[in-house]
Image: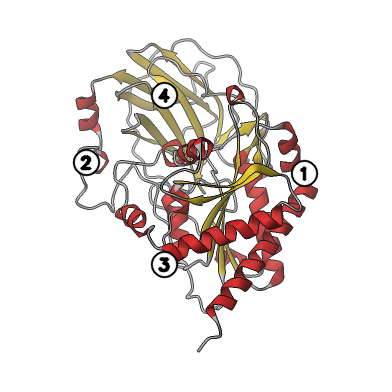
């Protein structure tokens, strides 16, 4: 427990380095903003004491049409920012210092003009991000921050104008263009900084290392029901699982995140691989659209090139969009991912992953409700480390009333965490027995 601070790995500072952002602000004269939105009600999770010193965003709105669209963000002080486009899918990303978003529930879910929707949230400690999903290619015609004036607060303003794809691609940074491969992928303005591992002390502890990966985080809420978000539910579960595992003293534990921070999928895999993890457990909570009926219970997934069923395929496609949701450049996929896809032929890792999945199912079914088909497989990117046994556990459906009651219950969580800890013990006992005594 005392060494927990050394067991958490954050993405490197890179673009978003606390409040010391050096982003240039494009200046422009004040312009008429179009209709003002009504006063924004605070979100359910309004400012906690720990974020009182961060800038506050109190309102956000869109104006205009499908030729020109304006975005306006009301603030309590001026901030620095950087805005840049990304392709496939068409997006505009705005990086800003960490902001306390006190926006009305549902803000950004309805689009207007050139913007289909937008989302916002923490992307790393000290940095927030706004990501716009676009109806097509656009250019950022103007972007600036206005001073408070005439009874209006400071405002961040972005103007989008429709352009063709050729012009859009030419506006991208060279390393972000879909039709180009960067000569040096180490300096892309569109990607989240890589995981920092150099500062970690050398590991001499012989105990098996377990990586717990609470899904989503920061700008990526995951599924949602009312004021309950997947990212918060699975973080609470992951922290409880870490504490339970650490109590035994038999394992080392790393969390991919311990707060509301966005971690790209590839960085989650890197954490497990660079630390030579013995087991990777990703925690999620699914949801079904109303039109697709109802489902309940926990499900355990392993990786496979071919999905075990349509629901597994749907879920993998949804989870694999996390980087797009977070505004990560998808055009320059690291070569490691291609290598991982090839290395999936390593049967030993698959065998261990499947073995742990079965042990986990056997333990969990005695304490928590399981899905009618509790073992499934699909092409989850987060499970594609070729040398680390990995599973993804959907602990329940936030779209199911009964499951949601369990997910917010500390008593249920304690039972589920206990059964997972027992499965981990059984898994490593079997592995050690198979390996035999050290020579």
Q: Which residue is mark 3?
A: 198
- C-alpha gap between disc 4 and disc 2: 26 Å
The numbered mark, 3 or 2, whose residue comes first in the sequence reads 2
Residue at the bottom extreme of this rendering: 439
- Mark closer to the chain start, 1 or 3: 3
Q: Which x, y percent locates residue 203?
A: 50, 75
| Dot 4 and dot 3 residues touching (CB under 8 Å) | no
User: Quarter of the image holding residue 359?
Assistant: bottom right
Evaluate if marks 3 and 2 touch, with contact meaning CB atoms under 8 Å apart.
Answer: no
Q: Secondary structure at mark 1?
A: loop
Residue at the disc numbered 4: 157
Q: CA distance from mark 3 to mark 2?
A: 28 Å
Disc 1/disc 4 C-alpha distance (Å): 42 Å
The residue indicated by pointer 1 is 409
Q: Is residue 413 above or below residue 196?
A: above
The nearer-to-camera label among 1 and 3 is 1
Compare marks 4 and 2 and give the one earlier in the sequence.
4
**Residue occupying image coordinates x 80% and y 49%:** 411
Q: CA distance from mark 1 to mark 3?
A: 39 Å
Residue located 30% across and 46% down the image? 188
User: For mark 2, does the 10 Å Cα neighbourhood hold few (<14), some (14 to 19), or many (20 or more) residues?
Assistant: some
């Amino acid at each position: 427990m005392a060494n927990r601070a050394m067991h958490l790995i954050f993405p490197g500072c890179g673009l978003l380095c606390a409040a010391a952002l050096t982003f240039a602000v494009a200046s422009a004269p004040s312009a008429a903003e179009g209709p003002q939105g009504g006063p924004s009600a605070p979100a359910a999770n309004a400012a906690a004491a720990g974020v009182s010193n961060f800038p506050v965003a109190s309102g956000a709105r869109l104006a205009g049409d499908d030729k020109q669209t304006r975005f306006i963000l009301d603030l309590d002080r001026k901030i620095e920012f950087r805005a840049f486009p990304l392709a496939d899918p068409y997006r505009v990303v705005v990086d800003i210092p960490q902001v306390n978003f006190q926006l009305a529930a549902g803000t950004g879910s309805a689009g207007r003009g050139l913007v289909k929707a937008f989302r916002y949230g923490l992307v790393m400690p000290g940095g927030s991000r706004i990501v716009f999903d676009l109806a097509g290619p656009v250019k950022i015609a103007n972007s600036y921050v206005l001073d408070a004036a005439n009874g209006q607060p400071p405002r961040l303003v972005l103007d989008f104008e429709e352009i063709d794809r050729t012009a859009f691609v030419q506006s991208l940074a060279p390393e972000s263009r879909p039709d180009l491969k960067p000569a040096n992928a180490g300096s892309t303005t569109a990607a989240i900084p890589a995981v920092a591992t150099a500062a970690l002390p050398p590991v001499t502890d012989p105990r098996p290392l377990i990586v717990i990966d609470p899904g989503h985080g920061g700008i990526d809420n995951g599924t949602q029901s009312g004021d309950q978000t997947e990212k918060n539910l699975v973080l609470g579960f992951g922290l409880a699982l870490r504490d339970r595992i650490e109590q035994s003293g038999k394992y080392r534990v790393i969390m991919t995140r311990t707060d509301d921070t966005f971690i790209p999928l590839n960085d989650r895999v890197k954490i497990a691989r660079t630390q030579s993890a013995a087991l990777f457990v990703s925690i999620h909570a699914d949801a079904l659209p109303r039109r697709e009926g109802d489902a309940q219970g926990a499900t355990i997934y392993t990786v496979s090139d071919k999905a075990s069923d349509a629901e597994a395929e749907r879920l993998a496609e949804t989870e694999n969009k996390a980087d797009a949701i977070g505004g990560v450049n998808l055009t320059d996929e690291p070569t490691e991912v291609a290598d991982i896809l090839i290395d999936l032929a390593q049967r030993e890792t698959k065998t261990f992953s499947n073995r742990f999945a079965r042990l986990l199912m056997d333990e969990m079914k005695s304490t928590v409700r399981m899905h009618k088909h509790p073992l499934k497989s699909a092409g989850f990117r987060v499970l594609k480390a070729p040398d680390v046994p990995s599973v993804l556990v959907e602990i329940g459906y936030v779209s199911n009333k009964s499951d949601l009651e369990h997910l917010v219950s500390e008593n249920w969580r304690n039972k589920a965490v206990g059964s997972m800890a027992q499965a981990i013990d059984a898994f490593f006992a079997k592995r050690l027995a198979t390996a035999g005594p050290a020579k």
